[in-house]
Amino acid sequence: MSKIKCRNCDKELFYNSISDIPTFPFCSERCKLIDLGSWFDEKRRIEEPITNDQLENTDT
Ligand SMILES: [Zn+2]
């Protein structure tokens, strides 16, 4: 039995193998999406500044 903390909310997770946790290293799909979302936002901000065109497209 191993233990990790969810990268997003620090909730403790116990598992025998990583495949026991489909959302590893997160406690839930929600935390996974939140973390990935913030990571993508960060990366996008660094690599390609958002133009007015892109801002309009995010509404759809
Ligand atoms: Zn979590």
Image (cartoon, helix red, strand yellow):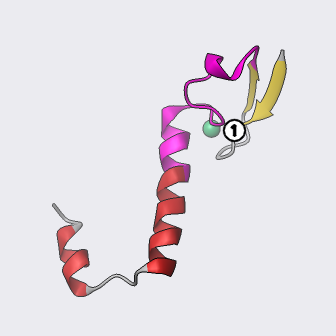
The quadrant holding residue 15 is top right
Along the line of sight, the residue nearer the viewer: 11 or 47? 47
**Is the residue indicated by label 1 positioned so its CB lies within 8 Å of ligand 1?**
yes
Residue placed at 46% from the left, 67% from the top? 41
The quarter of the picture where the N terminus appears is top right
Quadrant observed for ligand 1 in the rendered image: top right
Tell me: residue 4, above or below residue 34. above
Tell me: residue 6, above or below residue 19. below
Q: Which residues are magenta?
A: 15-35
Residue 38 percent coordinates (x, y): 52, 60
Q: Is residue 28 left or right of residue 47?
A: right
Magenta-drawn stretch contains 43: no
* Residue identified by numbered label 1: 6
Task: Characterize the local packing of mark 1: few (<14), some (14-19) or many (20 or more) Cα atoms within 10 angstroms.
Answer: some
The quarter of the picture where the C terminus appears is bottom left
Q: Is residue 55 left or right of residue 34?
A: left
Q: Is residue 47 left or right of residue 57?
A: right
Residue placed at 54% from the left, 60% from the top? 39
Along the line of sight, the residue nearer the viewer: 34 or 44? 44
Magenta-drawn stretch contains 21: yes
Residue placed at 24% from the left, 76% from the top? 54
The type of residue carrying mark 1 is Cys
Residue placed at 83% from the left, 21% from the top? 2
Q: How many marks?
A: 1
The quadrant holding residue 7 is top right
Label 1 element class: loop
Residue 47 percent coordinates (x, y): 47, 79
Residue 28 percent coordinates (x, y): 55, 31
Residue 3 percent coordinates (x, y): 82, 26
Q: Is residue 23 left or right of residue 17?
A: left
